[in-house]
Amino acid sequence: MTAPKNRWIRTAALLTSVAMAAVVVPALVASPASAATQTITITKSGFVPMNVTIKTGDTVSFTNADVAVHEVLFKSTTGFTCTATPLVVQPAKTQSCTWTATGSYPYADPNQRANSFKGTVTVEAEVVAAISLNALNSTVRYGNDTTFSGKVTPATSGTTVDILAMASGETAFTKLTSVATTNNGAYTAVVTPEIGTSYRAEFLNGTARVASTVTAIQVRPQVRLVLRSVEGVRAFLRTAAISSLSYQGKYVLVQRKSRLSGWTTVKRVTLGAQSTARFAVRLPSGTSSVRILLPASQAGTGYLASTSRTLLVTR
């Protein structure tokens, strides 16, 4: 529904479209990368390759392509498990070891003197793909934007990050926009929710989609208050409520600030066809602080309660 039109009401411009929901749903969870296997071939002249780098959980297979029996002996005895102890590899056979701890693991064939029969297995920690999503503001007024920031792991530049959204009342996420990461894997995205909206970020890591947790942005309607004139004991004002909904027939509360009791409601005003109203309110002599409150019960589904700016009215 179109926002109310009035010469003194500026219609909020939407920087990004798509209405989405404030319903929080579980995010997609990325699975750790599958364990890999690397092969070291034992030839008559040595190990090929001599040095390999793997991740925790990976396996190294030693395949004997020589006609002689070879032994693989590690300096360390912990951090890995092997198919046999000691690791003796018959011709045309394979034995393997799987690593559970990071570190550097030198090994050699104790029966050979050549340096080509020495090597090192370097084990690095597995990098689990992940993406974060953080909002600069968790609550905005209708028509205003907020900025998301986050980072992808592994941290690479040029990774495409999709921002998905689901508006209040909807049941599925849809893609809102895409941005690219910088050198350290960071990204930013600007969104302008029309209504309470849930967001998540996703990127493609290999063949798997990796998703952030869900971040909800709450929205307050715009509430305007303008002083028209002061005549005698009365102040004449006008107000409007602005969001994607019509507030015709809804009411707002006129409040005055008291030093003793805070904000006190002095009048209830029903909004007209353009979600606006003109009204008068009696005020004491001196300067009064006046505002409009749109209660949550009147703001509508997907919106929070909202207040106007505070006017100082002197009579």
Image: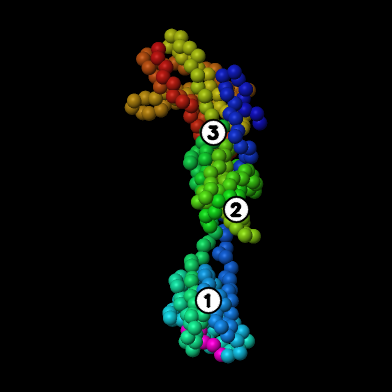
Residue 57: x, y in percent? 53, 72
Residue 55: x, y in percent? 52, 69
Span colored in magenta: 69-73
Q: Earlier in the sequence, mark 2 or mark 1?
A: 1
| Disc sitting over residue 186 in the figure | none
Packing grade of label 2 (10 A; few <14, some 14-19, many >=20) is many
Residue 285: x, y in percent? 37, 14
Q: Is residue 118 visible?
A: yes
Q: Residue at x 39, y 19 (%)?
A: 288
Q: Which residue is mark 3?
A: 144
| Disc sitting over residue 50 in the figure | 1
Packing grade of label 1 (10 A; few <14, some 14-19, many >=20) is some
Q: Which residue is mark 2?
A: 203
Say which of marks 3 and 2 sits in front. 2
Residue 140: x, y in percent? 51, 36
- The answer for how far apart the CA atoms under marks 1 and 3 are is 60 Å
In this rendered view, identify the residue nearer to me: 279 or 194.
194
Q: Residue at x 57, y 63 (%)?
A: 31
Q: Is 149 located above or below residue 95 in the figure?
A: above
Instruction: Identify the amino acid type marked 3.
Output: Asn
Q: Is residue 55 magenta?
A: no
